[in-house]
Every structure is written in C-alpha cells, then in structure tokens.
C-alpha cells in the first residue's frame, strides 16, 4: 500500500446539514488504494495554515478514481473546504491509517455525529448481516444512504427521530445484536461501547481522532493511550494516524 | 558546483538537514523522499529510557505556525540502537542523533551508549529539556549550566557535538559563547519559542501541556536574527533553523551565517520540502553564478 500527496480536483460539493458538507474529489490511484475506515489529509490553500485536516473517507469510487468526504465545518480549514466548487483543487495525502478489518460475523455498525461518514463505505463493503445504528444531536444526514446496505436504527438526543437518547439507548430499545461492533464517533460514545462490548463478550473496533500534524506516524502528535507497551513507541502510546485510526477497543485506554 | 559543507570535520553533501522531532528517524519520510539526497538526517530526541511524553492534545495550529508539546516521547536508547540506527545504515547521508535527558547523568548515559556506534556521525544535545535537579529550569536557559553540560558531554562523546540552543533567553549570544567555552563543536538554533493558545469555545488551553513550542514561518525572522547574532559571536559552525519552507528561506539563514540548515515544521505541510530546498539552493547558486556554497555562508555582514 502506498501513500501519495497529490493535487485533487473537486468533482462536486453539496451541503447535507447546517454545518455538514459532502465533497467528491478526483484522486486517481489513491481511490484504488483506499479502504473503509482510512482517512486523507486535506491541506489548506492558504499558506499560513500549515497543518493538514485529517478527514475520514466516506465513500470510494475505485472505478472513477474518486473519494467522497463528508465533514463538519468546525474551523478555518473546513470552512475553506466548504467553499470549494467543482473544478477547484485541494492538496491531499492518502490513503492514511489502517482502516477496518472486514469480517463475516453479524455486525453492528455504530456511529455518532461526524463519525457517521466512514461507516457508509464500510456498510457498503461488509458482506454480512448488519444493523446500522446512527446517533445524532438533532439534524440527520446520510441516514437514507445507509438503508440500501442494512437495517438502520436512529437515535437523536432531542428525540426528533428514532429513539430519544444515545446510540446505546437505541441498541437496547431495538434489541440490536451482533458478534462484532464497528464504530466511529465521540470518545464518550466509544467508551460506552467498549464497556458494552466487553459486557456482551463481543469484539469492538473503534476509530479514534486527535489533532494531527504529519499524518504518517513521524511526529507523535496524535497519540492515544494503549493497554500494553506499543511495539513501535515502546511506551503506552499508539499513533492514531499510523497504528489506527481503527483499534480493537481492548487495546486502547479511553 | 560545490554544495558540500563541513560541520566540525563532518562533510555533508549539501547543507540541508532535518530538524529533530519532525522526521522521526527517517523511516516514515523515506516513502516520500530519497534520504540519500539529504545532507543529514537528525533523529528525534532519544533518552536513556523510554519517555511517554505529554497527554494529548499535543499540538495546535497558529497563524503561520504551530505549537507543540510532544514531551520528547521516545522509545529509549535500546530500541533506538536496535531498530532506528540499522535502518539508517543503508543510506548515504550523515546521521546526527539528538540526545535528551532530565539530568547530566541521563545525557551522559546516552552519549556513552552511542560512543561506539559507527553509524552516528554527530550528536545534537537538546538542552531545552527541564533539569529536574535544578527545579525544572531548562539547561539551555542558564549559561553556567550550558557550559557545564557541554563540558560533561564533550568529555564522554566520541563524535563531534552540536549544542541546540533555546531562543527563550534574553541574549542568545551569551548561551552560544557558554557552549563554545564548554567545547561545543557546533551550534544549532533555534529550538522552538514557548507559546500558548487558548481554545475560547472550550475555555481551556488548546494543548494539554498549557504551553508549547512555536515553530513554522511565524518564527523565521526571529531565527534569522539569532543566527546572525550568534554567527558574529562565536567561531564554531552554526546549523540554522526556524520556519524554513523554501530554498529562499534557507538562503536567508546561510547568508546570515549558518553553515547548514534544518527543515522542521515544513515537513508536515509538504513532505517533499527537503529535496525541494536542495534543488532550490542549487538553482539559486546557478542564478547568482556561485561555484561554492561556502562563499555564501555569512556573506551578509
């Protein structure tokens, strides 16, 4: 697997929710290398912004050489990206990170907020029985697109759709079951899922995020705590960009 | 055209190096650049035992710069010698190992361990680490401590030593002279400038350590000024760094008195920066009809 840094062309961009945008990028061979759960580093066109923004891959079109990213505007960089139109260019590096290991076991895909996007390509590529549990604060996005890949269960904090509460409330309310959990979302959600999976005695794969600089494992900015001494760092730290972002929940401390 | 430069008897094929901590030990960046092209690879700081570093978040972006407080996380000298040095063995570039410690003894442990490593061409001593025995003030902020640690390292080291100076001082030439008096073979500057960023939405510090080291183009004018001052205060060669992104940036440092230059933060923005700077320096020399890079070192008085 090789990583490259290229100038990608924006193929299309649309707004999905009040601060959530969907962008398809022409990325050539990066698409054929990419796997669900991996991410790309997206660089600002403003030279005064030095660091790339790590954004998860939402969908992969290997045939056309395109990647889709769905991202929330949270600061200057993502605001700039949201203003890009078809034909504009952005420097990107990828594919980065390890991605999910696809298993055949009955799966529960659990995502919260801006952790929802990477689950779409995963749902598409997972060849097994699966339930997709999506948690939102209030405004829904991407949920309709999941329906073609499996049963979709929704949780909203304000109760405007599906179960009122969080993803675990929805899992319990809908009696969702499976042998393996794949997840991406805010840390409190991942922490609760890790516990849930341990109680049930099932595997859980979680995708973490942290502020990143190099994106390739050199700078040690984006570490998480690991249960055991990591073979590379030789301390209780794993590099999210390189060893992750997907980890077996048992190997990391949240 | 000659781009070779000499650092205390160690000949670099060109003056372009990398700044410690921004390049690992080269393995990750070897996917992007041919390490054989670099004047030198400077490794991430290594200590006598593994250091876990600081809690995350460890970095924050700032205007034309970034703050970092990695906390010198490193795997310790044992694993470093077993894994990182053999990796660098296969490349035709000079290897400079950055050394950190919390006490003189910890520095000396590493220096002694590296003394018989043939692959190590030079040592760079990071004296911005807090001296635990002296209440946590960095070695590099007290001229007496700078001279003492330099002397102690010099007595044990088998390779030439580079003392890496902190810019967080009133007069960096005082520290430079102290290092020279202690027997330093070479100086590198500048380390990062201590800064802070507040996350106004979360109403807390942007990085967990509260303060972090500022690097990137934002610090370049400060770094060029300090290199110029130090070049006029000492006789030993200087490695200049601080916000270098282009060959033009590198030339500023060389003209100000640096014999070599290091690329740091720019590696994160563009992993090809080192080779682009090497090519750019050659283009600059052609454009100015310069046969030997050494003619340009400290040309601006």
Image (spheres, coloured by chain):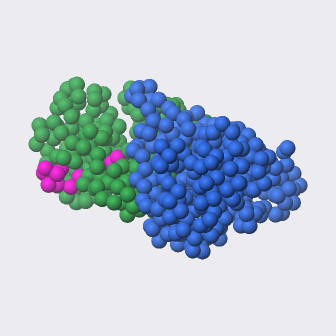
Chain colours: A green, B blue
The residue at 42%/59% (across/down) is B50
Q: Nearer the viewer, residue A135 or B219?
A: B219
The residue at 57%/48% (across/down) is B139
Q: Nearer the viewer, residue B144 or A186?
A: B144
Residue B201 position in % (x across, y down): 41, 26
Above or below, B14 against A72 in this view is below
Relative horizontal placement of residue B231, taking residue A248 as reference (left or right): right
Residue A191 position in % (x across, y down): 24, 43
Quadrant showing the N terminus of chain B: bottom right
Q: Nearer the viewer, residue B126 or B249?
A: B126
Total numbered labels: 0
Is residue A202 inside the magenta stretch?
Answer: yes
Residue A136 position in % (x across, y down): 27, 32
Q: Nearer the viewer, residue B272 or B148?
A: B148
The residue at 21%/55% (across/down) is A203
Is residue B178 inside the magenta stretch?
Answer: no
What's drawn in magenta, residue-wise? Answer: A197-208
For the question of whether residue A178 can be seen, the reply is no
Above or below, A142 against B31 in this view is above
The residue at 40%/49% (across/down) is A223
Relative horizontal placement of residue B75, taking residue B7 as reference (left or right): left
For the question of whether residue A100 can be seen, the reply is yes
Relative horizontal placement of residue B55, taking residue B253 as reference (left or right): left
Seen as rendered, the residue at the extreme right is B289
Quadrant showing the C terminus of chain B: top right
């Amino acid at each position: 697997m090789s990583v490259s840094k290229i100038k990608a062309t924006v193929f299309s961009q649309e707004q999905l929710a009040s601060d959530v945008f969907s962008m398809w990028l022409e990325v050539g061979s990066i698409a054929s290398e990419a796997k669900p759960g991996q991410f790309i580093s997206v660089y600002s066109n403003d030279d005064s912004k030095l660091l790339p923004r790590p954004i998860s891959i939402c969908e992969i079109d290997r045939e056309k050489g395109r990647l889709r990213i769905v991202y929330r505007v949270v600061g200057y960089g993502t605001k700039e990206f949201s203003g890009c139109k078809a034909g504009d260019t952005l420097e990107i590096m990828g594919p980065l990170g390890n991605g999910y290991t696809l298993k055949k076991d009955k799966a529960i895909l659990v995502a919260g907020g801006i952790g929802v996007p990477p689950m779409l390509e995963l749902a598409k590529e997972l060849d097994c029985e699966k339930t997709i549990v999506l948690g939102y604060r209030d405004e829904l996005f991407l949920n309709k697109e999941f329906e073609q890949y499996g049963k979709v269960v929704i949780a909203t904090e304000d109760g405007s759709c599906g179960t009122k509460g969080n993803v675990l409330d929805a899992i319990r309310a809908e009696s969702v079951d499976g042998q393996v959990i794949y997840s991406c979302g805010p840390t409190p959600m991942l922490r609760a899922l890790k516990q849930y999976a341990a109680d049930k005695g099932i595997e859980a794969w979680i995708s973490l995020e942290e502020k990143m600089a190099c994106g390739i494992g050199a700078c040690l900015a984006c570490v998480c705590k690991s249960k055991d001494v990591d073979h590379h760092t030789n301390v209780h730290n794993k590099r999210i960009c390189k060893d992750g972002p997907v980890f077996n929940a048992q190997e990391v401390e949240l | 055209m000659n781009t070779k430069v000499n650092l205390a008897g160690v000949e670099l094929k060109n003056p372009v190096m990398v700044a410690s901590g921004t390049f690992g030990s080269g393995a990750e960046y070897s996917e992007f650049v041919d390490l054989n092209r670099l004047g030198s690879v400077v490794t991430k700081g290594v200590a006598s035992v593994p250091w876990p570093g600081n809690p995350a978040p460890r970095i924050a972006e700032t205007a034309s710069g970034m703050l970092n407080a990695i906390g010198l996380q490193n795997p310790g000298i044992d694993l470093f010698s077993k894994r990182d040095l053999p990796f660098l063995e296969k490349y035709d570039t000079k290897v400079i190992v950055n050394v950190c410690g919390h006490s003189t003894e910890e520095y000396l442990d590493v220096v002694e361990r590296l003394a018989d490593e043939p692959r190590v061409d030079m040592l760079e001593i990071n004296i911005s680490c807090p001296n635990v025995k002296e209440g946590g003030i960095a070695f590099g902020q007290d001229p007496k401590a700078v001279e003492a640690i330099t002397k102690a390292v010099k007595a044990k080291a088998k390779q030439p030593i580079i003392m890496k100076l902190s810019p967080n001082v009133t007069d960096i030439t005082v520290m430079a002279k102290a290092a020279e008096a202690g027997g330093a073979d070479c100086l590198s500057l500048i380390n990062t400038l201590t800064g802070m960023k507040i996350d106004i939405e979360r109403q807390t510090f942007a990085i967990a350590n509260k303060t972090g080291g500022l690097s990137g183009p934002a610090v370049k004018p400060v770094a060029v000024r300090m290199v110029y001052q130090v070049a006029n205060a000492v006789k030993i060669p200087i490695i200049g760094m601080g916000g270098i992104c282009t060959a033009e940036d590198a030339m500023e440092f060389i003209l100000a008195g640096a014999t070599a230059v290091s690329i740091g933060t720019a590696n994160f923005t563009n992993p090809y920066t080192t080779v682009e700077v090497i090519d750019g320096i050659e283009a600059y020399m052609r454009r100015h009809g310069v046969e030997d890079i050494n003619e340009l070192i400290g040309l601006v008085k």
